[in-house]
Image (cartoon, rainbow, N blue to C red):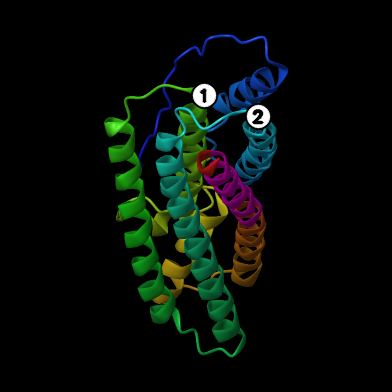
Amino acid sequence: MASFHVRSVSLPKSSHPLTLAVEEQLCQLRTTEQATSSSSICKNLSGLKDLYECVEDFLSTQDGECFNSSLDGSIVVLDVCSITKDVLSQMRQSVQELQSSIRRRSNEVSEYMISKKKITKVIRKCLSDLKNNKKNETEVSMLKEVEATTLAVFESLLSFVSLPKENKSLISKLMPTKKVSHEESSEVIKVDIAVKALTKGIEVNNVQKTLKALEMTLENLEDGVESISRCLIKNRVSLLNILSQ
């Protein structure tokens, strides 16, 4: 799983209350940005919304100096946000289709597996791009820190809905004597275990319940990302307006 560490740079303190408000939100998110559970990721998405509301207030007091790079960065963040929304939407649709097939007793697991492989490929490409973006980043400013923190939160989300590389012990995790780690107990992992069992003809109890739990998780994450998307668009419009003055 990729790791996208935000710079541990201490920003210079400012007496401006709006600057301090942004820095306070950044500090809160830095401590939890590498979340590994759906609830903590949803909390971080909510924190990002609060962060961008503070950024919006901050931008309203600024002129256009030194904002060109932030405008470029806003495109990067919007692209990652868009990819994340598409991934979550596709995953939720695949889960719903699998639920429907199981109710019809057709168990069209192969279609779900094909969809999962396509989504996983998109996620891994995006995570790789995030790592490269971190390596190429040299400028340090408050808005760059906002961008880096936002990307880190998206990275933790994509990592959460991604899956570890295949291993032959996956089905054995169904055994009640097998200890399951915090990460392995995520909704995504539980569904993958159940689906792999179905492909091997193993009857899995409460598989629909497991699928429903993942569907609800994906829906909550989608709602959070959609809120961030609106904030990011508003942020970019504000930057464009400032630069055009």
**Sequence-earlier tag: 1 or 2:** 2
Above or below 194: residue 130: above
Q: Quadrant of residue 223?
A: bottom right
* In-image side of 164 versus 21 (left or right): left
* Mark 2, residue position: 58
Query: What's the amino acid at mark 1?
Result: Met
Identify the residue shown where x is 53% and y is 60%: 85
* Callout 1–callout 2 Cβ contact below 8 Å: yes
Identify the residue shown where x is 53% and y is 31%: 146
- Majority secondary structure of magenta residues: helix
Query: What's the amino acid at mark 2?
Result: Phe
Q: CA distance from mark 1 to mark 2?
A: 11 Å
Residue 124 can be seen, yes or no: yes
Near mark 1 (Cα within 10 A), the count class, few <14, some 14-19 or many ≥20, is some
Specify start and end residues of the magenta stretch as a single range: 226-242
* Mark 1, residue position: 142
Q: Quadrant of residue 198?
A: bottom left
Is residue 11 rendered magenta in the image?
A: no
